[in-house]
C-alpha cells in the first residue's frame, strides 16, 4: 500500500478531496485516511509539523501496511538557484538539528546510526518525471535538510549549504526517512519552495505556501498515474 503524508492542511486537503471510499482510522494524535486516489489504493495523512509528529505518523502508516511512503509539502529553498514555486525531489535527507559534535560526531550524526538517509531510486525517478510535467517551475534533485526550526536568516541558509550541502530546509522529511529506513520501506520527499529561508521567509511563506503546495500535490498525482495499481 502506498502512503502519502503531508504536514499541514494545505498540503493534504487537495488530495483528501479526491479520495474515494474514504475510511478514517483514528490513532493517538493523528487520523489516517484509507481509500483510493486516482484508482490507486492509498493511505493518506496529515502528520502535523515537526520531526516527532512525522516519525510518529510514519510509524502508524507502516503498522497499517504502508510499503512505500511519499512525503509532500513546502520547504525553504537553500540552493541559490531555487525560486519560489520550484520543486525539490529528495536525493537524500539529513537532520540538521542533531548535534553530538561535543562527542566528536559530525554534525547531523546520531551516534550508532546513519548521518543521512537515501531516498528510493525508483520513487525519485517517478517523482522527477511527474515534476517535469509542471510548467514554469525548475525541478532540482537534492539533499533535504530537516530540523525542528523554521529557517529565516542568511546565516541559517549558509550553515545548511556549507555544513550539509542542503538544497532545501523543512521540518519533517528526515524523520520519516529514518523510520522508513529502519523498516526497509522505500520513501521519497517532494517539496515545493515557499520561501528562500532568509530574512523574507516568514512573509513569503505566508504569501506563497497555499499556492505552491498545489505543485507538490500535482507531482503526487503524476506519480499515481505512473505507479498505478502496482503499489
Ligand atoms: N518550510 C517552508 N519554509 C521553511 C523554512 N524556511 N524553514 C523550515 N521549514 C520550512
Image (tube, helix red, strand yellow):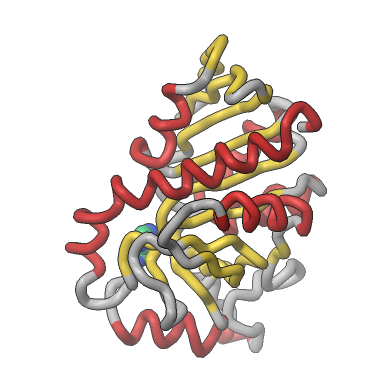
- Estimate the x, y position of residue 125 in percent, counting from the top left: 72, 56
Q: Tell me the quadrant of ligand 1.
A: bottom left
Residue 196 lies, with reference to residue 49, above or below; the image says below
Q: Residue at x 30, y 52 (%)?
A: 209
User: Residue 159 or 17: which is nearer the viewer?
Assistant: 17
Query: Residue 201 vs residue 8: left or right?
Result: left
Quarter of the image for the N terminus: give it. top right
Q: Name the residue nearer the viewer: 40 or 206.
A: 40
Q: Quadrant of the C terminus?
A: top right
Can see residue 35? yes
Residue at image x 40%, y 71%?
Answer: 77
Q: Is residue 190 left or right of residue 14?
A: right
**Image-quadrant location for residue 149:** bottom left
44 or 137, which is in the foreground?
Answer: 137
Residue positioned 35% across, 52% down in the render: 212
Side (left or right) of 218 relative to 185 = left
Foreground pick, 207 / 126: 126
Q: Image point 30% across, 84% down: which residue?
A: 154
Q: Position of residue 59 (x, y in %)?
A: 65, 38
Amino acid at each position: 500500500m502506498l502512503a502519502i503524508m503531508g504536514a499541514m492542511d494545505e498540503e493534504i486537503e487537495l488530495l483528501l478531496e479526491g479520495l474515494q471510499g474514504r475510511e478514517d482510522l483514528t490513532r493517538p494524535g493523528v487520523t489516517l485516511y484509507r481509500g483510493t486516489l486516482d484508482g490507486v489504493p492509498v493511505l493518506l495523512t496529515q502528520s502535523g509539523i515537526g520531526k516527532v509528529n512525522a516519525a510518529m505518523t510514519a510509524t502508524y502508516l507502516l503498522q497499517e501496511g504502508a510499503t512505500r511512503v511519499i512525503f509532500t509539502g513546502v520547504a525553504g529553498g537553500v540552493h541559490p538557484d531555487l525560486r519560489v514555486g520550484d520543486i525539490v525531489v529528495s536525493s537524500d535527507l539529513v537532520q540538521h538539528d542533531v548535534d553530538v559534535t561535543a562527542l566528536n560526531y559530525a554534525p547531523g550524526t546520531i551516534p550508532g546510526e546513519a548521518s543521512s538517509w537515501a531516498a528510493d531510486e525508483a520513487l525519485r525517478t517517478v517523482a522527477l518525471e511527474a515534476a517535469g510535467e509542471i510548467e514554469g517551475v525548475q525541478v532540482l534533485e537534492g539533499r533535504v535538510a530537516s530540523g525542528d526550526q523554521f529557517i529565516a536568516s542568511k546565516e541559517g541558509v549558509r550553515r545548511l549549504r556549507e555544513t550539509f550541502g542542503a538544497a532545501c530546509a523543512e521540518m519533517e522529511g528526515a524523520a520519516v526517512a529514518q523510520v522508513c529506513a529502519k523498516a526497509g520501506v522505500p520513501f521519497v520527499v517532494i517539496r515545493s519552495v515557499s520561501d528562500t529561508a532568509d530574512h523574507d521567509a516568514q512573509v513569503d511563506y505566508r504569501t506563497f505556501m497555499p499556492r505552491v503546495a498545489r505543485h507538490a500535490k500535482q507531482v503526487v498525482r503524476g506519480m499515481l498515474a505512473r505507479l498505478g495499481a502496482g503499489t
